[in-house]
Amino acid sequence: MPICSFCKKHYKEPRGLTVFTFDGKTVHFCSSKCRRNIALKRDPRKVNWIKKEKKISKAEKEAEKKAELLEEKETLQEEKIESLKKPEEKKK
């Protein structure tokens, strides 16, 4: 999967545009929006819509981490309960 040269987003191959420069570099664009912004010589770090996408992705990552931590805690609690039950069964 190529990565857009402007917004750094991964996109699937049939989409977007790939430009080969005369010096042998390849430049990938996921949309015409990114292509126009490069033509206008805009800095991707200063464009608001890219900043919003990055914030959303960070929030999603944090939510995923919290969900994983909760799952790990639940499995640890289940293992503790099982380990406490096992010695009782051995005594019988």
Image (cartoon, helix red, strand yellow):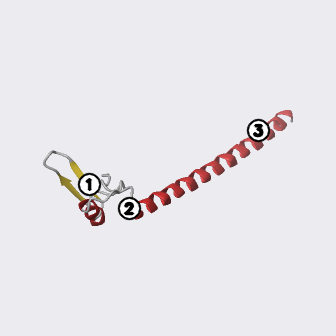
Mark linked to residue 83: 3
Q: Distance between the residues labelled 3 and 2?
A: 55 Å
Q: Mark 1 points at which residue?
A: 28
Mark 1 element type:
strand
Where does residue 84 sit, x and y in percent of width and height?
A: 80, 39
Q: Which quadrant would the C terminus be assigned to in this image?
A: top right
Which residue is rendered at x = 49% and y = 58% of the image? Answer: 55
Where does residue 51 sit, x and y in percent of width and height?
A: 44, 59
Whether the residues at callouts 1 and 2 have beta carbons within 8 Å, the answer is no
Residue flagged by tag 1: what amino acid is it?
His
* 92 left or right of 3 in image: right
Residue flagged by tag 2: what amino acid is it?
Val
Query: Which mark's residue is nearer the viewer, 3 or 1?
Result: 1
Q: Distance between the residues labelled 3 and 1?
A: 55 Å
Q: Mark 2 points at which residue?
A: 47
Q: Residues within 10 Å of mark 2 (few under 14, many from 20)?
A: few
Mark 3 element type:
helix
Mark 2 element type:
loop
Where does residue 85 sit, x and y in percent of width and height?
A: 80, 41
Which residue is rendered at x = 22% and y = 56% of the image? Answer: 18
Residue flagged by tag 3: what amino acid is it?
Ser
Query: Which mark's residue is nearer the viewer, 1 or 2?
Result: 2
Residue closest to the eye, 68 or 39: 39
* 72 left or right of 86 in image: left
Q: How crowded is mark 1: few (under 14 residues within 10 Å), some or many (20 or more)?
A: many
